[in-house]
Image: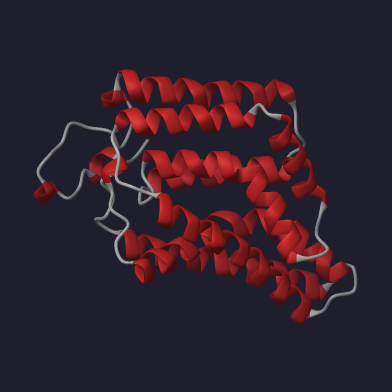
Amino acid sequence: MRLRHAVTAVTLGLAVAGWVLMIRLMDGMDLGPATPLGPFAFFVAGWASMIAAMMLPGAVPAVVRRVRDGGGVGAAALFVAAYLGVWTLVGVVVFALYRPHGPVAAGVLVIAAGAYELTPVKRHFRRRCGESGHSGFGYGLHCVGSSIGLMLVLVAVGLMSIGWMCVITALCLAQKLLAARAGVDVPLALAVVALGVVIMAAPGFVPGFHPPASPLDGGGHHHSHH
């Protein structure tokens, strides 16, 4: 029992460290969808911190389950490393495909993400993410499948926005820890689609989207909060 508590504490500690490192790395970099990603090494460091911050709290039950099923500290560490490794590979793909973009492209991506939330594929991965836990790699793949739509929203609206990160983290955590319910999940998906429509039609109403301003004004940090 003590081992499970220790593993939980260390996993959550890594998440907190991720938040601290990410906030320091991304300070002053949030330009909404126009944000450039910077050099590859910088981006990967930021992405790994972000994934640790956003995804580790929801992975705690799976890590504890891994320990309970007979794995020791080493097995738990390997599980977490493999899980973060899968998400880091997703980051490499994001880096390869990402371009600074405007409201129209952001809106299209967000609408696509909302539509994905309604698919059987999403439901399958969400269920598997909730129950799997034999290997960090398999668990990572299922959870990427479950959370990729919400992460696409973050890529679309502003990868360096702490405010949006907090919103997406809360949604990913809720989907990991709560059972799927159409009464909650369908309105959420429709809300994401509606957000995409608003971004395209009236971007000024969405936090992080604002008229082009001088880069000297701090990159619009004051717009990135809810």
Give the quadrant of the N terminus.
bottom right
Furthest-right residue in this view: 70
Of residue 65 and residue 16, the one placed in the foreground of this image is 65
Q: Quadrant of residue 211?
A: top left
What's the image's color scheme? secondary structure
**Which percent across, then down, holds residue 123?**
74, 35
Quadrant for the C terminus, please.
top left
Q: Residue furthest bottom?
A: 74
Q: How many marks?
A: 0
Residue at 52% x, 23% y is 191
Q: Is residue 135 above or below residue 188?
A: below
108 w.r.t. 141: above or below: above
Regarding residue 91, the answer to whether it shows in the image is yes
Q: Position of residue 32 (x, y in %)?
A: 30, 42
Q: Is residue 199 left or right of residue 2?
A: left
Look at the image and tell me whether residue 9 can be seen.
no
Residue drawn at 53 percent across, 33 percent down: 113
Q: Is residue 3 left or right of residue 223?
A: right
- Tell me what residue is drawn at x 34 percent, y 65 percent: 24
* Position of residue 63 measured from the top left corner of the image (x, y, whole percent): 75, 64
Q: Quadrant of residue 209?
A: top left
Question: Does 152 sit above or below residue 60?
Answer: above
Task: Please indicate whether residue 145 sits to the left or right of residue 156 in the image.
Answer: right
In the depicted structure, whether residue 176 falls above or below residue 138:
above
Pinpoint residue 65: horizontal percent, then vertical percent: 83, 62
